[in-house]
Amino acid sequence: MKLSILDLAFIAADSTAGEALNGTLDLARHAEEWGYERFWLAEHHNMVGIASAATAVAIGYVAAGTKTIRVGAGGIMLPNHSPLVIAEQFGTLESLYPGRIDLGLGRAPGSDGHTTRALRRSPAAAENFPQDVMELQALFGPVQEHQKVQAVPGTNLNVPLWILGSSLFGARLAAMLGLPYAFASHFAPAALMDALAIYRREFRPSAQLQQPYAMAGVNVFAAATDREAQRLFTSVQKQFANLVRGVPGQLAPPIDDIEDYWSPVEKAHVSSMLACSFVGNPERVGDELQQFVEQTGVDEVMVVSAIHDHHARLESYRLIAPLLG
């Protein structure tokens, strides 16, 4: 099973952004030692519980502190940026850490409307996503005759692109462009099977990829016992319940009984969003992950573990590392 890690540099309720980023690097070093395939960070803005807003900077920090693991974005929200700036940023990363950089691209803003305006971007920028992806591809390719603008560094580096998504749109775009596809089933699983089917059916080979390659995000909370794993899971359950309430915050410590925290309506909503979550002892989690891979046919699984305590988080990833291979 190919396993990778999606990290948001979660800021725990009793810590700072600096501590969160240091924890991210520590996790990446362990992931490299344990044999994980890749380590991605994601762009989110105006979120007090996430420290990876300057995603290219955070990727550079992780890449500098590791040696072999692939490091990248899962993803860069392309409507927030010009393709040229992203080509320059990731061309720089590829130049510094050759053969180790991935660039996953998302169409969502990764923020709210007020933040989109603060970024000096129009909400309509998302409509240009397919064209922006192709422009970015061209900037990473060889210079063409009469080309007036090029990314330096970036030109001819062919940084691997991925399309991210939680709907059918991304699946169709990834298939049309012949790019690998990563589905955000760790928080929006509803369209997973339909999106994978469309991606595989409509896939067109490209210079980057000859056969479809799909990855799915899942939440994993592994511990020595099922009871302890369920307790660790309450941190992210609380976090999503707070999002439903419109009061996002930092990653809170776990609690003994989540039923005392949320209403039945909140429980139903959060449970649907977190349906692709595997919680329990290592044997249980391993069996359920294997079933997930068999049911979906995905080539790779990207694991998210929003665990409040850093050491418990490391232990969760360590416990499932024997699945790698």
Image (tube, helix red, strand yellow):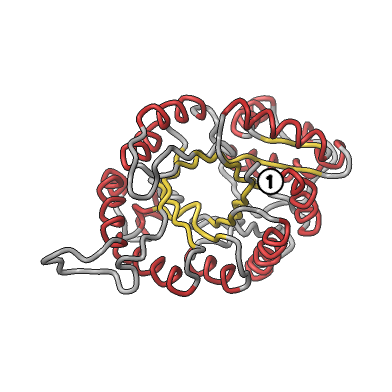
Q: Residue at x 45, y 70 (%)?
A: 93
Q: Residue at x 55, y 60 (%)?
A: 70
Q: Position of residue 88 (x, y in %)?
A: 35, 69
Vertical order, 227 against 43 (above or below): above
Q: Residue at x 62, y 72 (%)?
A: 65
Q: Nearer the viewer, residue 108 or 243?
A: 108
Vertical order, 238 against 137 (above or below): above
Residue 133 as seen in the image, left or right of residue 11: left
Q: Nearer the viewer, residue 193 or 159?
A: 159
Q: Quadrant of residue 19?
A: bottom right
Q: Is residue 44 visible?
A: no
Q: Position of residue 282 (x, y in %)?
A: 81, 40
Which residue is tagged 1?
325
Q: Secondary structure at mark 1?
A: loop
- Amino acid type, callout 1: Gly
Q: Position of residue 213 (x, y in %)?
A: 47, 40
Q: Residue at x 44, y 37 (%)?
A: 212
Residue 76 as seen in the image, left or right of residue 232: left
